[in-house]
Image (spheres, grey):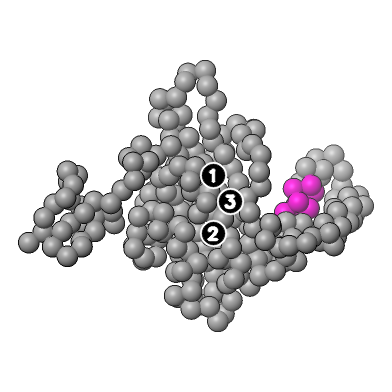
Amino acid sequence: MLYFRACNEYNDKDPRWQVEGPFLFFKATMARYNPSFEIHVHGQVPLRADVSRKQIEDALKPLWSYAGAKSLNQGQGSSYEDEPGIRVDGEDHLLQMCWTVQGDEDFRQSLDELCMNLNEIAVTGSSIEVTFYDSEYEDGEGPQDGESRDDFLMLFVGPNPGAIMQVQRDLLVQDAVNLMERHFDGSELGDVIAEIDKLFNRRFDAMVSSLEIGKPPRGGGHGGGRKPRHLH
């Protein structure tokens, strides 16, 4: 027989309900009752061919454990049914993430740990987009004349500093070309790309430690209005 130690209605699909001996506990922090943000994680990370399922699950633990799950299988689903969630393609050795969770600012700590873990199993450099959507602003409960607390982070992971900087360089070149092709022909932008390469070469030469690469950039991410959600 199970003895209820919480006033919440039991739901066997909710991972926050946990059985310990003859007791049934509802485990949740106060912050989860009224989460400040909907947090969307989006990206693809090519994995080493020798990485096991257990290694992948351990690397992703900062995500699924934050959602209150006990395993990747239990926590890989997104808050939105139309999002694929967290998926691993075994044949292509590809981790794909399109996953939303309810959370707060403390999720940033999970992102730090996630980046360090993925560095260990990634085969090439990759980018991961993380968007914080202000729940109160979304529901119309925030100040009428206030600004949303939406934020956007671009994270980078990879097996070594060179691989991470390569994907950073490629994204910057793509952004610069897309912007400047409004005014110049693509064939005229060789010198611009060369200057970008010089900047990254100098940064790489001056780098003392690769540990700083995978961390989210500091500073505001509020400019330019709200970022559209990923649609599927």
Is any part of residue 2 visible from this angle? yes
Say how many tags the image has: 3
Classified by dominant secondary structure, the portion drawn in magenta counts as helix
Q: Amino acid at mark 2?
A: Glu
Q: Using the image as rendered, state which of residue 35 and residue 171 is in the foreground.
A: 35
In terms of sequence position, does the residue under pointer 2 or pointer 3 come before the other?
A: 2
Report the residue that reaches farthest toward the left: 1
Residue where numbered disc 2 is placed: 113
Q: Position of residue 7 (x, y in %)?
A: 17, 43
Rate crowding at label 2 as few (under 14), some (14 to 19) or many (20 or more) other CA atoms within 10 Å: some
Asked whether 175 or 146 is in front, the reply is 146
What amino acid is found at the position of numbered circle 1 in the picture?
Thr
Task: Check whether the beta carbons of the residues at disc 1 and disc 3 lie within 8 A of each other.
Answer: yes
**Residue that label 1 marks:** 131
Which range of residues does the magenta coloring cover? 171-177
* Residue 164 appears left or right of 139: right
Q: Is 154 contained in the magenta span?
A: no
Is residue 110 toward the left or the right of residue 29 in the image?
right
User: What x and y, as percent, mark residue 212?
Assistant: 68, 57
Amino acid, disc 3: Glu
In which image quadrant can residue 140 be found?
Answer: top left
Q: What quarter of the picture does the N terminus occupy? A: bottom left
The answer to which of 40 and 24 lies nearer the viewer is 24
**Circle nearer the N terminus (1, 2):** 2
Which numbered marker is on residue 129?
Answer: 3
Residue at (11, 59) in percent of width and height: 2
Residue at 72 percent of width and 56 percent of height: 168
